[in-house]
Image: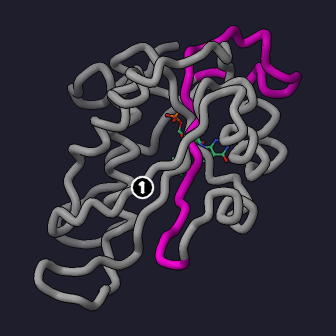
């Protein structure tokens, strides 16, 4: 059953979803660069661009390091991705002309916008993406050499969609697009009604 939008939206918003079955085929660096380029053009507070991405291609030590930082449930299917990409951001910034770094309250918000740009670009190019919050931050931070000034938000599995049948038992039945809350549950005029 295809997703039904309650109001007219561009098709990509309902057609994009997060499958877990990947083919594992190699992803050209040029394609990954295009995804990152889409993220680069995201809006951010004061144009600080706090987002940072660290990635590994399948078969590399970087990929293995990121995979090892995922919770076992995610390792069970993300191991077939073409690329594992860590989405992080810098928590502080130095204003032009200043020397002190100040907290940037919008670093996470802006990193979220950048990840969505990347996901949309991926969808338009025939790739699938699947964000994951299920990771061990300490393990990943060590693997990446993350400074104190940075925060990891998610790991994204990127690749080409594989057959549902290739998934571990238990995940096959979940391999379909889900639905959303009604608009009335997430948006209201004037006052918080939720
Ligand atoms: C920040 C974030 C964390 C997520 N964490 C996980 C995860 O650890 N494991 C998983 O299988 N899916 C994870 N997901 C996928 C969501 O469950 C999925 O995006 C949501 O159900 C909406 O479905 P859709 O992306 O197919 O539209 C995560 C998604 C996001 C954006």
From this view, report whether residue 134 is shown above or below residue 16. below
Picture coordinates of residue 131, whole percent (x, y): 56, 42
Residue at coordinates 31% horizontally, 86% vertically from top-left?
A: 101
Residue at coordinates 42% horizontally, 63% vertically from top-left?
A: 89
Indicate which quadrant contains ligand 1: top right
Q: Quadrant of residue 166?
A: top right
Q: Which residue is mark 1?
A: 52
Picture coordinates of residue 68, whole percent (x, y): 79, 47
Residue 178 in view of the camera: no
Label 1 crowding class (10 Å Cα cut-off): few <14, some 14-19, many 20+?
some
Q: Which sits in the foreground, 61 or 178?
A: 61
Q: Which sits in the foreground, 87 or 6?
A: 87
Classify mark 1: helix, strand or loop: strand
Which residue reaches farthest right? 169
Residue at coordinates 48% horizontally, 59% vertically from top-left?
A: 88
Residue 149 in view of the camera: yes
Picture coordinates of residue 43, whole percent (x, y): 20, 53
**Does residue 152 belong to the magenta stretch?**
yes
Q: Quadrant of residue 75?
A: top right
The residue range painted magenta reads 148-176
Asked if residue 135 lies left or right of residue 29, the reply is right
Picture coordinates of residue 184, whole percent (x, y): 33, 51
Image colouring: one colour
Which residue reaches farthest left? 97
In the rendered image, the quadrant that contains the C terminus is bottom left
């Amino acid at each position: 059953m295809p997703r039904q939008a309650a109001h007219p939206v561009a098709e990509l918003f309902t057609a994009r979803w997060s499958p877990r079955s990947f083919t594992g085929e190699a992803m050209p660096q040029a394609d990954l660069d295009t995804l990152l380029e889409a993220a680069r053009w995201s809006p951010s507070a004061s144009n600080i661009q706090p987002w940072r991405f660290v990635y590994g291609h399948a078969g590399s030590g970087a990929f293995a390091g990121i995979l090892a930082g995922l919770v076992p449930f995610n390792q069970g299917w993300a191991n077939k991705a073409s690329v594992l990409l860590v989405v992080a951001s810098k928590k502080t910034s130095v204003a032009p002309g200043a020397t002190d770094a100040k907290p940037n309250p919008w670093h996470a918000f802006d990193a979220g916008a950048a990840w969505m740009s990347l996901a949309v670009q991926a969808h338009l190019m025939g790739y699938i993406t699947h964000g994951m919050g299920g990771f061990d931050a300490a393990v990943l931070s060590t693997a990446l050499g993350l400074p104190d000034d940075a925060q990891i938000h998610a790991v994204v599995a990127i690749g080409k969609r594989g057959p549902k049948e290739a998934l571990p038992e238990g995940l096959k039945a979940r391999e379909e697009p889900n639905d959303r809350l009604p608009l009335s549950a997430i948006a209201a005029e004037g006052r918080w009604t939720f």
